[in-house]
Structures are given as structure tokens and as C-alpha cells.
Image (cartoon, rainbow, N blue to C red):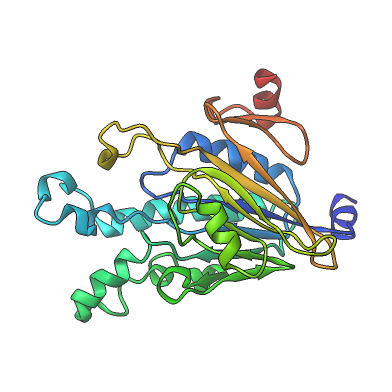
Amino acid sequence: MGRKKDSTRPYKTALVIPDPHVPRHDPQTHDAILAYAADCWWDYWVCLGDLMDFNCISSHNKDKLRLVEGQRIRADYDVANELLDRYQRACRKKNPNVKFTLLEGNHDERIERYIDANPALEGMLEVPLGLRLKERGIEWVPAHRRGAKKRIGNAIFIHGRWHNEHHAKKHALNYGAPVMYGDTHDLQSFSRILDGDDSTIQAQSLGCTCLYAQDYLHGSPTRWQQAFGVVSFFPDGYFQPTPAPIFKHRFVGPTNGKVYDGRVSQKMSRKEVVSNAE
């Protein structure tokens, strides 16, 4: 009965995950999102890019081998595959036909630059191969290298192009449709003025799901904010975006009002997690 009711809703819903940066993702934050994902019906799952971090091949670490001691591409892929396994299981719990999309971010694209410098490795290390995307049925969007976009209804999903102080305004002015993106790791929104009712173009950044304490920050202050997004689409293409900020690995589910807390032991049932958090 639950599946029949959800499948006939007058709208479709997307779970949008920004910038995990595996293996520098925040496990407790993802535990909370995964618990929420398993409780709800999803038609789409979209990762806005930088699923991978690839710190071990970053040009910033050239000649700094001590900083990447023990880090391996294969090991990073193993961690990312486990995280994808968990998201696919969680999102398919209510709807086995959910559609999955992974956008390429600038950190994901590091592997392409590495292959450009070492062409003998072509066909061995690319993200679609390392994450078995074809086998998983996950759509790959080369957003960073080729500027490709994912469109659902009237909305465009990209990784992100600008990082200035008013980056949401920059995105709104340069894209001809409402756009949601990651990359900047913060929450920012801007609405472009247009003539006519219901014609506003809004740009919305959706934060990040990585750890705040990244080595390259050296303890500097940031405007980073962990978050994710839920977007509901009507049949005519109009949609309702809901950014969900996460504080201390905890948030209220935008669609069900339950509290999800990634700090609570995974050994406890989801019902106990919600009860204790309340």
C-alpha cells in the first residue's frame, strides 16, 4: 500500500547530496542522511560532484609526499563504493526504481588530469570505472571537464562554477534556468529579477557533506556548512527546493519532521534514534 500511495503522488522527489569528498567525507553526517533516505520515497538521487577527493594526486601536494603518505587511489575508491552501496540500498527501500545521477566535480576531475599526464593509465582509473557506475545504473555527468548539466523539470543541477563572495548571484545571472550546485561548501541563494509571474530564476548552493577539518585549511575560518537538499517536482516542471542544514550531525527531516542524529550508535534501530534525539 505504501508504494502504491507514494508512486501516485502528484509530484516527484529528489535527494540531493553535495560534495562528500571521500575519504574526507563526514561518516556521522552521512549516517544521519542515510537513515533519513531509508525512511522516505525518492524518485531521484543526485550527487552534485566531488564524491571523490583524490588528495593523493592533487597538484597542491606535488613534492609534498609526506602529506600523502599511505594514501592510495584504490583505497579511496573502495570507501566511495561502500558509501554508494549504502545510498543505493537506502534509496531503493521505498522505490526500487529510483534514478541515480553523479556529477563530476573539480576534485573528481583530478583523476582525468592525472591520466592526461600518464596516458598509459587510460581505461583503468576513471571515476565511472572505479565506481562501477554502469553496473550500478548510475548516470555520469561530466560537469566539470565538459560543462555538462543534469536537468530535472525546470531545474538545472551543476557542480558549480564560481567561488566569489556573491557566487549565487553569479550563477543566477549566467544560467537561463533555476540552478542548484555544490562546490562552494556553503549555503547561499539569489533570485534574478525577471518580468512576469512565476518567472524568477533562483540559484541555490547546497553546502557540503565532508569533514570541516581539512588539512589544507590549516585551521582557517570558513563559511562552510554541512547540508543536503530535498527537491519536489510538479508535473509541469516547477519545483520546491528545501535546503537542509546539518548541525552537530543532526537535522529534522524536511519531508517527515523526524530528527536524525548521526552521533547515535548504528546498532540502535532507526526508531530508537529518532526517539532518543527527541
Residue located at (74% from left, 63% from top):
194
Residue located at (68% from left, 60% from top):
44
- Residue 193 appears in which quarter of the rendering? bottom right
Q: Quadrant of the C terminus?
A: top right
122, above or below 89, in the image: below
- Residue 80 appears in which quarter of the rendering? bottom left
Q: Nearer the viewer, residue 134 or 174?
A: 174
Residue located at (76% from left, 51% from top):
41
Q: Is residue 25 left or right of residue 255?
A: left
180, above or below 260, in the image: below
The x, y position of residue 264, in whole percent, is 55, 25
- Residue 88 appears in which quarter of the rendering? bottom right
Q: Nearer the viewer, residue 10 or 129?
A: 10
The x, y position of residue 83, in whole percent, is 48, 50
250, above or below 154, in the image: above
Q: Nearer the viewer, residue 167 or 92?
A: 167
Residue located at (69% from left, 62% from top):
98
The x, y position of residue 148, in whole percent, is 52, 74
Question: How many marks overall?
Answer: 0
Q: Is residue 106 left or right of residue 158?
A: left
